[in-house]
Amino acid sequence: MMNDAQRLTEYQRGLAESRRHKLRYRLDLPVFAALHHKFLKPRPSGRGERLEPLDLKLRIWYTVLVKRAFRFRFYPTEEQSVELNRTFGCVRVVWNQTLAERHKTYSTTGKGISYPETDKNLTALKRTPEYNFLSEVSSVPLQQTLRHQAVAFTNFFAKRARYPRFKSRFEKQSATYTGRGFTFRDGNVKLAKMKEPLDVRWSRDVPKDQMPSSVTVSRDATNRWHVSLLFDDDIEPFPWSGNDIGIDLGLKSFAVLSDGTVIDHPNLLRKKEKRLARYQRIMAKRVKGSNRRKKAKQKVARTHASIKDSRKDFLHKTSTDIVRQYDVIAVEDLAVKNMVRNHKLAKSISDSGWGEFRSQLEYKAEWYGKTFVVVDRFYPSSKTCSECGYLLKELSLGTRRWTCPSCRTLHDRDMNAAKNIIAEGHSALRRNSGEARGADVRHMGETPVLSAMKREPIRAGGSG
Ligand SMILES: [Zn+2]
């Protein structure tokens, strides 16, 4: 048996380890619960106090620390929109000037520019009479845009992103405020150089008693304003359900699950898409440059934006539901980019946001302590009989149902594929854990993470 001092050492070691993975308290519950009262103060959220002896099962208890964005509509006053539009303009100028400088320096010396250098250049730029209007707005968003550009270049050189582009005033505009650039008090957001707080439509709760680490204000092409608050958030894992699931991308439906569940595209989305098609036809008939065309164009843009929002809601809701309901979630590696050869499939994938859905499943599985596993894309999930393992020579894309020549089972194409995907997911997990301990590896107190560690848990864009 360990004594308390040894336990504490062990705890601290675990903590140090978990920090490396951005996970907190990677310890089993009994140790944690025992130490909690001895060495840790109860946290303001009271979460630490909610641990009950009944919950002392053999599972790792941890919370994942992530950055979570909470995004809301807001309606600026006349004065605020003037100030923000001016700030957007300055952010754009700073971004573009700095980008041009980087181009120039790189082409003449072959070297990059560091963030501190760009900061110094900005100070110099503000002093020139031509650009002293930059001093009229808050300096925080201008500095932030330099930081964003530095990150964009780091990502570009690490081959994670494409080359940063110049910003145009016709696309979405945004400005990020940090530190002294904003205040967040009594549920009100106030930005630098503004007298009044923003009129935010709080559609859901944000973490209480906590300051956001940044506030980003944006205006999209259809003139809608959003404010996005970035919070450090502790996420408690969902309880295990004992059920695992394979997911197959449906052609007619959005997805088919191995337990027989069919997830359809939401009706609302279909209606909106029909409406969009109608507006596009109307727009095409209008004379170019006419007022009626301008109006029709606005309608098209608005419908586009609303479709985007509905799809996002749908994807977030669906992925959270799945991660809540199932412990191991297996999907096929679709390599979306390589599927253009099959136009029907490619369109279906890109239209339905399947790539986004997959990445949501991956990071949410990590947030909530579930396992996400990707099955090799060369694995013939559709052509294999999930009952007896018989492999068909060929299966055309149009065949929705087929009967296995070996065991005579009648298969629904997608559901059979989904069943194979979870079976293959299980064996991938077994292979990965080194020995044949089965998918139950997660119940034995091991790290329930397979591919999850590849992704940084800190995400700016995730929500829901
Ligand atoms: Zn069979």
Image (cartoon, rainbow, N blue to C red):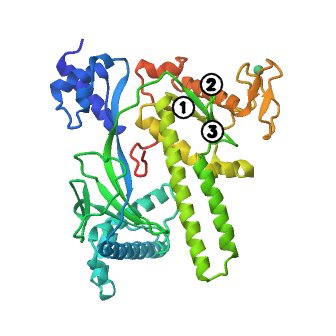
Counting residues from the start of the chain, the first of labels 3 and 1 encountered is 3
Residue wearing tag 2: 423
Tell me if mark 2 has few (under 14), some (14-19) or many (20+) residues whose alpha carbon lies within 10 angstroms of its own. many
Which residue is rendered at x = 26% and y = 32% of the image?
Answer: 47
Q: Quadrant of ligand 1?
A: top right
Kindly state the secondary structure of the residue where label 3 is placed. Answer: strand
Instruction: Give the amino acid type for the residue marked by disc 3 in the picture.
Output: Ala
Residue wearing tag 1: 329
Kindly give the residue lying farthest to the top in the view shown.
1
**Coordinates of residue 63 in the picture (x, y in percent):** 33, 34
Kindly state the secondary structure of the residue where label 1 is placed. Answer: strand
Q: CA distance from mark 3 to mark 1?
A: 13 Å
Residue wearing tag 3: 255
Q: Is residue 284 visible?
A: yes
Examine the rendered structure and indicate whether residue 288 appears above or below residue 33. below
Kindly state the secondary structure of the residue where label 2 is placed. Answer: helix
Q: Quadrant of residue 127?
A: bottom left
